[in-house]
Amino acid sequence: FSGCWPGYCRRLVEEVSPIFAWVFAFYVTTVVFAMTRIITALFLKDTLACAANDAEMVVQERNKEKKAYAAKLHEFFQAADTSGDGKITWEEFHAFLTDINVKTYLDTLGLETHETKNLFNLLENSEGTMTATDFVEGAMRLKGHAR
């Protein structure tokens, strides 16, 4: 625990003066304290570096989740577009949302479907239809405001 400083200090304390015991005690205390502070600083540096990486990872993870959410919405749009023209009319949207499984799926995506007409009106464009882009961007805005 003490290293070998007592062996080196013993001759000075016994043959020269007992005051050297206090000098060595102060020296050892100072060195141990300094080493402890250096080790603490190294741990703190590594911890802060990890925290900076965590912030970047959170941003990357959030972007990844947004892309996955947009992909699910796009798949939903493709399934709802029964005419295959790349646009959803009110009739297609309403017919698709009559299925309870579809409503449940949209609920799991964070979109409430209890007022289907209002949901369609929020997402539609000026032509009274919805394109995939309108649907995905609108649904992402709606989910963002819900949070």
Image (spheres, rainbow, N blue to C red):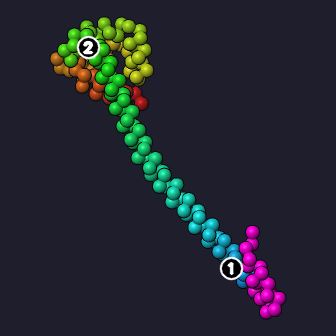
In this view, the residue farthest toward the left is 127
In this view, the residue farthest toward the right is 14
Give the CA separation, mark 1 to mark 2. 81 Å
Disc 1 designates what residue?
27
Disc on res. 58? none
Magenta extent:
1-20
Determine if residue 21 is in view: no
Using the rendered view, name the quadrant where residue 27 is placed.
bottom right
On the image, the x and y values in percent for residue 115 come to 36, 13
Q: Residue at x 36, y 7 (%)?
A: 98
Magenta residue check for 17? yes
Q: Nearer the viewer, residue 33 or 71?
A: 71
In this view, the residue farthest toward the bottom is 16
Disc 2 designates what residue?
81
Using the rendered view, name the quadrant where residue 60 is placed.
top left
- Which secondary structure, mark 1? helix
On the image, the x and y values in percent for residue 45 come to 51, 60
- Mainly helix, strand or loop, the magenta region? helix
Quarter of the figure with the C terminus: top left
* Residue type of the residue flagged with mark 1: Tyr
Q: Nearer the viewer, residue 93 or 43?
A: 43
On the image, the x and y values in percent for residue 13 come to 80, 87
The reply, left or right, for residue 99 in relation to residue 88 is right
> Quick one: label 1 or label 2, which is nearer the N terminus?
1
Q: Residue at x 65, y 74 (%)?
A: 31
* Residue type of the residue flagged with mark 2: Asp
Determine if residue 50 is in view: yes
Image: 140 above or below 8: above
Magenta residue check for 4? yes
